[in-house]
Structure formats: C-alpha cells, structure tokens
Amino acid sequence: MFRNSAAKCVHLVGALWGRKAGASLTRCLHQTQVAETNVKDLAPPPTSPPGLANLQEWKVTQGPQSAAPVADGRPRPAGVEISVQCHPSQLIMTKRLQAQRLNGIDHNPWVEFVKLASEHDVVNLGQGFPDFAPPDFAMEAFQRAVSGDFMLNQYTKAFGYPPLTEILASFFAKLLGEEMDPDKNVLVTVGAYGALFTAFQALVDDGDEVIIIEPAFDCYEPMTLMAGGRPVFVSLKPSPIQDGELDSSSNWKLDPTELASKFTSRTKALVLNTPNNPLGKVFSREELELVASLCQQHDVVCITDEVYQWLVYDGHQHVSIASLPGMWERTLTIGSAGKTFSVTGWKVGWVLGPDNILKHLRTVHQNSVFHCPTQGQAAVAWSFEREQLYFGQPSSYFVQFPQAMQRSRDHMIHSLQSVGLKPVIPHGSYFLITDISDFKRTMPDLPGTADEPYDSRFVKWMIKNKGLVAIPVSIFYSKPHRKHFDHYIRFCFVKDESTLHAMDEKLQKWKAELK
Ligand SMILES: Cc1ncc(COP(=O)(O)O)c(C=O)c1O
C-alpha cells in the first residue's frame, strides 16, 4: 500500500524541491496519476540505474503522521528516508493537477489505431478524410485567399468573416426555410468539432442530461461530460434481415417507446447526427418528426450534426430537423467545410440557430477562440458563392461529389463481400460498417486484453495480418452497450481510386488465403 502511495505521490515531489516534505507527503497521496517511481526502504539513494540517468532522486523524510504506512505489510518507523525518482521536466504540484472534468475521458481510441496503422504496411481506410484533391474551385479560392488581399492575413470579425456569415445565412435560409441574420444566426467555428464543443459548453450544466443516439460520433459523450452533463444513450437497432440479403442503414431504427422513455425533466439537449457516422443512416422525415415532437413536448434543445448532409446516395434526401415546424426555435444545426468541400484540413465549421440560443455560444466563443483563421473562411465563402451559382445543376459539386462517392461505396461493398465481410449499405456519409459475426464465430480467440471488444481485436489482427485499417464500431457505443455491437467494423470509402485498388489487392490476397 505504501509503495502505491509513494508511486502516486511522485507528481508532487519536484514541486517540493527545497521544502520540508514530511507534511506534504500526506497531501500528495491524493494524487491519482502513477508515474515512474523508485522507493527504496531504509537505504541511502543509490546511483541511477541505466536508462534512468535523467531522473532526479529526492529524499523524503517522513513525519510522525506517516509512520503507519507500510511497504511490505510491516509498520514503518517514523523518520525513515524514502528516495523517490521523478523526471525534472515534469510539472509536479501539491494540488490535484488534472481538472476533475477530464476524469475518465483521457483514452482516445483513434490515437491507438493511427499509431498501429503507422507501424505496418497498410491501406488506410480508417480515418474519415478524402485522400484525393479537393475541387479546383476550392483550391483556387484558397490560393486567392493567401495571395490576394493582404488584409486577409489579419483578424476578422469574432463570430465569422462577414462574406462567409452572409453566404451561409443566404444559402441555408433557403434550405431551412428561415430568414437568417448573418450576425445573429450564424457562428463560424474551428471545424464542426469547435461548433459542438461551443454548443455543449454554452448549454449543458452540471447534472443536465443529454440524449445521444448510438452509434454516435465519439466526441459527443466526452463533450457532455466535460460540460458537467450526463449522457443518456439510446441505440438504433437493426431489424432482422433475410438470409443472404445485405443489411441496410435504413433498417436500423429507434424504438419510439424507448426513445420517449429517455426524456426526463432534467433532459436539456438531444444530439442527432444525420447522415450518421459510422452507420451512414439518413434519418427519414418520419423519424425526425418523432424526435422533433419529443423535443418540443419535453422542452429540449436539439443539437444536430449535419456535416455529411451533401453526401446522400440512392436517391435518399437529407432533411434538416430545423426545417420541421416548430424546430428552428430549438435547434442548433452544425456543418463543416471540411466535409462539404473535401478540405478537412481547413477546419472551418459553423453553427446556425436562433439568436437567443446562439448568443450563449457567442459568449463561449468570445471567451475561448475569439477569431477563427480568416483565410480559410474567405476560401469557404467563395466556394459557397460558386456553389450557389450552380446549385441543383449537374456541374454543382453537391451533385457530382455524392455521385462519385456512391460509385466508391459500391466498389467497396463488392470488394468486401469477396472475403466474407457483410457490409451494411449506407445511404449517406463517408462510411460503411460491415458485419464480422462470421469471423467472430470461426476465429473467436484473437489476441487482445480480456475486456477488449471483439471488433477491436479483429481490427488489430486485420492491420497486422491483412494490411487493412478499419475502425471498431464498439467505440461509437457507450460502455454498457459495447458488447452488443462488437461484431461490426467501419471503413471509409471516400478515398482515391488508387487507394480502393490497393484495397482490392489486399482483399484478393486475403481471399486466396481462405482457399
Ligand atoms: C459526425 C461528425 N461530426 C463532426 C466532425 C468534425 O468535423 P470537423 O473536421 O469539421 O471538425 C466529424 C469528423 O469526422 C464527424 O464525422
């Protein structure tokens, strides 16, 4: 126990240089992070072992109050010296270092899979970004933004570069059926991520409940928690399908009774994502009407993440929930230039909504980011101006891009089937999920930690042995629900033809090994 406590206290020790440490040692036991430590019971400090040469050693003389702790079950006499090693460059405080709101959200699965992918010869179909060139008009707009008017190198208006807020207001006014004031109904953010974060910080208070529809983009839960809220999950569930048929994302539905049961007097917001990442489901008007009526009945704000709104397939229609009767007043609609114009690195996003809600997001924005980079905003503004001219016509990017991506989706669906994977046909987004139950049955014992979901072990196996990167779908579920959805993995098909051909080669090799 004492060894543990001493290990825990290592974060403190550097800060105690030159101080009397006895009393502080007790305080330091409250630290929760464990770092490299070396406690040597009564011995004087030895020289540092190899590999630890840059660690500092420090002797702590225990005060009488710490006589009780034991290293090995035996009581320790007061006044003994304990030598603790710590890294001199590590900030060590007598106070708790990490803010409470970060508890339990430090693990990020993306970091793990990106690292693993970098260590193998792989075709990366994991992360959601295009590996092909953005449209010429967007590239030209960016070049113009960086080489034209030198004032674009300076700050712009805090809540958005005026030509961008203006075009967003006029473009989306038509789609949402709502007149918009560029200054009051539009806020430009650092990507859709920034919009989401700002919305949670502005609206969610300690103890507020936020309903999240699973599978869900994985930042909604930690953003709710960081704001002090309580995530409440409800899952889309697949209906049974006929043998030999492929499942489809529209077959995954909310149970209306279950959804209604999640609303309480503490529910502050519901997060909707259509088209959905990772499933590719495009919510139908009827489904949105159900969500809308519950939000209205229980006086709840709807935060709707519509970053994939232009990517819909097979004649499906994206409907913005804010366009339904009575919903504009209680909806924040979030978009991303990254997903809209295939420029994820620009990190320009926005949130649209009524002034009485947006004013609270502006408060968060002006006290955090304040300005977003001007040149990226100018390039997005000009790209939208171009799209407004061609809207609905065959030369519109919003028409051409989904057509091209539907072809990529179909390419991937056919290829994955060749090795026994069973894609769930997506009707929107960058992604498809594929059922790996047959592998779970035939190869149940893939390496991994005891509590690691099967899909995570499968992806690691696939990266190492088949050279293909995907993302386990269980990460898009809350912990209690993960075990029910650990037999799906997500692929991104918004990739260059050459990447899809490289995928084919890997799959053909895999197929040959199956014989
Ligand atoms: C559903 C969803 N929302 C938001 C984002 C973040 O978008 P941005 O890159 O504009 O921050 C992503 C990115 O993958 C996403 O999939």
Image (cartoon, rainbow, N blue to C red):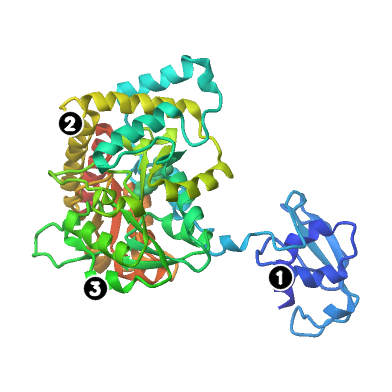
Residue at x 50% of width, y 69% of height:
207
Q: Which mark is residue 257?
A: 3
SS category of the residue bearing label 2: loop
Residue holding disc 2 = 392
Q: Nearer the viewer, mark 1 or mark 3?
A: 3
Tell me how far mark 1 sits from mark 3, CA to CA. Answer: 45 Å
Q: Which mark is residue 249?
A: none
Residue at x 76% of width, y 68% of height:
28
Question: Of all residues shown, which one is farthest toward the top?
Answer: 148
The amino acid at mark 3 is: Thr
Q: Would you say the residues marked 1 and 3 are in contact, meaning their CB atoms lie under 8 Å apart?
A: no
Residue at x 34% of width, y 67% of height:
298
Tell me how far mark 3 sits from mark 2, CA to CA. Answer: 38 Å
The amino acid at mark 1 is: His
Q: Quadrant of the C terminus?
A: bottom left
Q: Is residue 205 above or below residue 155?
A: below
Residue holding disc 1 = 30
- Residue 382 point in image, percent of width and height: 36, 24
Is residue 159 left or right of 435 when viewed as pictured? Answer: right
Q: Nearer the viewer, residue 324 or 24?
A: 324
